[in-house]
Image: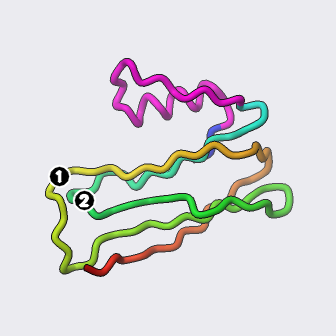
Amino acid sequence: MVLRTDAGLAGAWRTLHNGVPGNPPPAVDLTRKMVVLLALGPRNTGGFDIRVDSISAEGAGAVVRYTVTSPGPTCMNTQALTSPVDVVSVPRVDGQIRFDARRVVQPC
């Protein structure tokens, strides 16, 4: 998701931290920057990752290229619930943002 308002950032940050108090959103000047938040959602094991690779201008908007990594079928992973997330602040783009995923299976 792309966050361009204080209210949007505060709401997303609350969701990320399950509403636990004491986790304020980072201070970001949203008149000059925007926040890009990538989240995989809940996974049953470790070994998953998501990360922003690049953000580049395209016409009046931009493209966010990112990588989603998952463990290979023979990997031994942490047996715990995980929710991989990557959050970055970048110079503000007011146009449409397109997302382009690259998927990688990590061999063990």
Where 46 falls versus 5 (above or below)? below
SS under mark 2:
loop
Image location (x, y in percent) of residue 97: 70, 55
Residue that protrudes farthest toward the top in the picture: 21
| Residue for badge 1 | 80
* Residue at horizontal 58 percent and vertical 46 percent from the top: 88
Magenta span: 4-29
Image location (x, y in percent) of residue 101: 54, 68
| Residue for badge 2 | 46
Left/right of residue 75 with respect to residue 5 in the rendered view: left
Q: Amino acid at mark 2?
A: Gly
Q: Amino acid at mark 1?
A: Ala
Image location (x, y in percent) of residue 73: 22, 79
* Residue at horizontal 52 percent and vertical 45 percent from the top: 87
Mark sitting earlier along the chain (2/1)? 2
Q: Are marks 2 and 1 in contact (CB under 8 Å)?
A: yes
Mark pair 2, 1: CA separation: 6 Å
Dividing the picture into quarters, in which one does residue 60 lie?
bottom right
Q: Classify 10 Å Cα crowding around label 1: few (below 14), some (14-19), many (20 and above).
A: few
Where 27 falls versus 45 (above or below)? above
Dividing the picture into quarters, in which one does residue 72 lie?
bottom left
Left/right of residue 83 with respect to residue 79 in the rendered view: right
How many numbered marks appear? 2
